[in-house]
Amino acid sequence: MKKKVLIDILLIIAATSSTIYLSYLSAYNVLSLDDYGFVADLGTKSIWKYVADLYMNWQGRFSGFFVSGLLTKFAIYTNFYSIFFIVNLVFGYLSLYIWINYLVPNISAFRKITFSVLFTNIGLMSLLEFSTLYWICCFSYIFCIWAVILLSYLLFANKNNNVYTWTFIVILSIYLSGIAETFTPLVILLYVIVFIWRWYKCRSLKIMLNNKKNLRLMICLIIIFVGFLFMLFAPGNEVRLNGVNHDRIFSFSELIYKEIFASFIFIWRLSSKSAYFIILFPISLYIGYIMKRNGQTILSHYKITWKFYVIIAVCLLAFIMIAIAPCVAVMNWYAPLRSFSYMSFIIVAVFLFVGIIIGNRYNISNKLIDTLIVISLCCLIILSIYCCNLDFARAKQYYNDVNLRNEKLIQLENQGFKGIAIVKPFKIKQELSSYAKLRNAMVKYIKPSAMIEEYYFPYMLYGISEGKTCWKNNAIKQYFSLNYDIIGWENCE
């Protein structure tokens, strides 16, 4: 009983400390890069014209632009830009709670809540590009993860077949159909594999579709596929590609070489987040152990051998290669890491699945399980406190510096300034952020040139460049309605 109480106390401290860290940074977040231009656009356009203009002239991600546009409209009228973070956090907790409640119904509500909070927070803290969480324009890169989790529950676990279930299935399917060219194909691939497997088991499509769950899946696939085509053939896609200097790959042999090389570099980048995945593993062991104690056996009809884990590793590698293949072909390299935010959650899901299997199918002593989860939760608490200690003062200083600079720009405009305002980039010569320290610890012995100096992290830098016609500068100019140009210059006083 004492061990159970200790674990519960550590669970709530770990969940609370990691949530405080993520939430505090959100409270001091400011607009970054593209955010200025998009917010300025939405301040003068309806949501429909905003989406239509982007679809025709920039990118086909209609559903992602629509949802983030709605939230931006709310933020403009309320001046509450933390709404993006709050929505992501709430939907993360909700989607994982629903699945935990379905898979492990016999544990207490307290543990269901704390586990859902922990898994969400670990997934967010392990993002390949952590600033994605606080960059408004990247909201959909994370929200799409919760959409897939919720849609998968409605398709595969929910037994209700009422109008509310169908409504949510249609809405989520439409949203996922136009979210991103790098993400939607993976959703289609996942659901097609499930559909083919069920068709194979039923031996007949007609018999298969008599099952309402299978009918849901087929309709969902049709909606997502049609929406994906609508996104893919948007005129704006070609406009954006033509405006960016990328050498596209046309040789199959070159594509294979680049694909393999990029995949291993990508895995190496993932390894910089290994601390979070290692912390997660004992927690998943504990859940598997609880399920076993409650009489639930995972994959009871299958014999689990070493080959099973090899297959999981091969499938994960194949998934990574498939995920980055379109970007390698079009951009000659994988896309910015923010485009692969979902990958952190895939790794989290794999560690969860493997840990639950091991905890459920193997005879591990109660004492060892309890010891491991206590150590794991203590490590997460220490890591969260460490991150808070490093990043809180920096976040507040960044917030104050950006606001002071914005006030100066507005003051110049009010004074009727004409010409070019020279802005010095932010520099804080002090201890590195927690993200930079963890990443540098992983790469300094492999590739020292990849070490970073993220003094203001986790936020994006202010984004003013040396070219007065640069889109970053123009976005800020548009946002503040400035009648003069701005440039960034390192050596200005």
Image (spheres, helix red, strand yellow):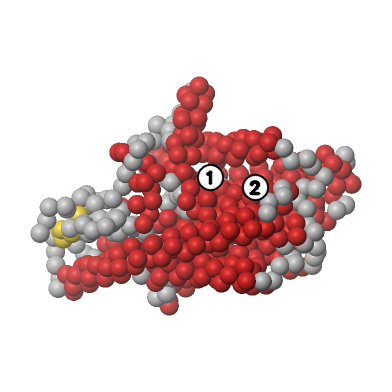
Residue shown at the point (61%, 64%) measured from the top left: 115
Amino acid at pointer 1: Thr
What numbered label is drawn on residue 354?
2
Residue shown at the point (35%, 66%) measured from the top left: 389
Q: Secondary structure at mark 1?
A: loop
Residue 356 rendering spot, x and y as whole percentages: 67, 52
Residue shown at the point (40%, 57%) measured from the top left: 131
Left or right position of 13 against 423: right
Q: Residues within 10 Å of mark 1 (few under 14, many from 20)?
A: some
Residue 380 rendering spot, x and y as whole percentages: 48, 60
The residues tagged by marks 1 and 2 sit, at their Cα atoms, a distance apart of 26 Å
Instruction: Give the quarter of the figure containing the C terminus.
Output: bottom left
Residue 210 rendering spot, x and y as whole percentages: 88, 52
Q: Secondary structure at mark 2?
A: helix
Q: Splitting the image into 4 quarters, where does residue 408 fall?
A: bottom left
Q: Are marks 1 and 2 in contact (CB under 8 Å)?
A: no
Rendered view: 78 above or below 36 = below
Residue shown at the point (43%, 78%) measured from the top left: 78
Amino acid at pointer 2: Val
Left or right position of 415 against 198: left
Q: Earlier in the sequence, mark 1 or mark 2?
A: 1
Q: Which of 363/492 is in front? A: 363
Rendered view: 481 above or below 245 = below
Rendered view: 280 above or below 305 = below
User: Which residue was labeled with disc 1?
Assistant: 182
